Amino acid sequence: MQTLNDIIQDLHAVESRIRAYERKYGITSDDFYSLYAQGLLDDEGFEQSAEFVRWASAYSLRKKREAAFMAASQVFVAEIQRGAMVNPIRLMPNPALAEV
């Protein structure tokens, strides 16, 4: 099972790769993935095909890690809210990140 820290590190690493593809091709990864999933892209041979597979894989990984991060965040926020019924919430670092 991945820790919260692992999920966040994965997100940062995959974001860097995704931004490089977006800079190179000038489209968002959402738009790319839509075209890719529909089979509409001309991959111009093995090099481009392999690059598109890597981009699509990075995009899928990002979506999975974002979902995991959102779920963990919602659990943490719910815990904070339960503990702060009348006082303003004092946001502190998530203890799950201390697992490093």
Image (cartoon, rainbow, N blue to C red):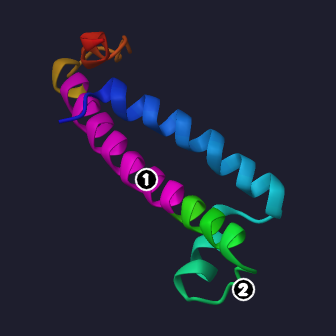
Q: Is 58 or 78 nearer to us in this picture?
A: 58
Residue denoted by label 1: 61
Position of residue 85 relative to residue 67, above or below, is above
How far across and down, in percent of the image, does residue 29 sit? Answer: 64, 63
Q: Quadrant of residue 4?
A: top left
Quarter that holds the C terminus:
top left
Which dot marks residue 42? Answer: 2
Residue 25 x/y as whole percent: 81, 63
Identify the element where label 1 is drawn.
helix
- Verify CB contact (< 8 Å) between mark 1 and mark 2: no
What residue do we see at 35% from left, 24% from top? 5
Whether residue 24 is situated above or below residue 2 in the rendered picture:
below
Tell which tag, 1 or 2, sits nearer the viewer: 2
Magenta stretch: dominant secondary structure: helix
Q: Residue at x 54, y 34 (%)?
A: 12
In the displayed structure, does residue 63 sit left or right of residue 51?
left
Q: Residues within 10 Å of mark 1 (few under 14, many from 20)?
A: some
- The total number of labels drawn is 2
What residue range appears in magenta? 57-80
- Say what secondary structure mark 2 lies in: loop
Q: Is residue 77 left or right of residue 33?
A: left
